[in-house]
Amino acid sequence: MAATTAANFVPCAEIPITGNGTGVLARAKQGEAQAFFVLFQAYASQIYGLSLSATRDVTAAENLTRDIFVATFTCLDDIHDDAGFTAWLYRRAAKKIVAQWAKRRYPQGFGHRLEPHQHLRFVGRGDLAIHPE
């Protein structure tokens, strides 16, 4: 990865986010730090707004935004369609926000473990087709 200096820094507005191999997303996939920064600048405010509207907590929204971008940058290679990056990012953010909301709303988790003999109590008597005869 080449070091980014002030001499080769290009302002965000002059770089297309997607393209035919020369876009920011393609450069970010190759590990270029400036491209990561450009993607973050392009989408951070929208992701932060989405997080803030869901959590109504500034600290939680900042942490979610950070976590979403860290997770995004670690799996950029999973994106096969550069034109669908925005939708992919929002989908990923929504999943993370919903998971965070569920964790805060239900800290004990969902349900409880059933004992091996308890699972039959949830099946209606007419539905049970096992007969020992």
Image (cartoon, rainbow, N blue to C red):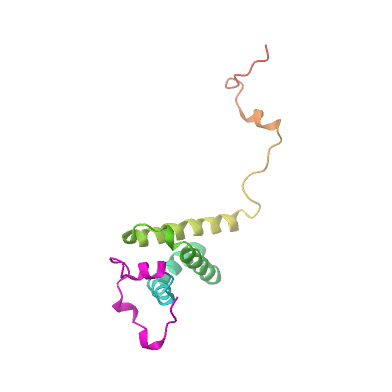
Q: How many marks?
A: 0
Q: Is residue 126 left or right of residue 47?
A: right
Q: Is residue 79 left or right of residue 114?
A: left
- Prevailing secondary structure class for the magenta stretch in the rendered image: loop
Residue drawn at x 33%, y 61% as measured from the top left: 82
Q: Residue furthest top?
A: 133
Quadrant where the C terminus sits is: top right
- The residue segment tinted magenta is 1-30
Question: Residue 123: percent from the left, percent from the top?
Answer: 61, 27
Residue 2 colored in magenta in the image: yes
Q: Residue furthest front?
A: 1
**Where, by quadrant of the figure, is residue 102 drawn?**
bottom right
Q: Residue at x 37, y 72 (%)?
A: 42
Relative depth, front residue between 4 and 51 = 4
Q: Indicate the position of residue 119 as horizontal and vertical percent values.
A: 66, 31
Residue 43 is inside the magenta segment: no
Task: From the viewer's side, name the closer residue of 20 and 115.
Answer: 20
Above or below: residue 63 compared with residue 14 = above
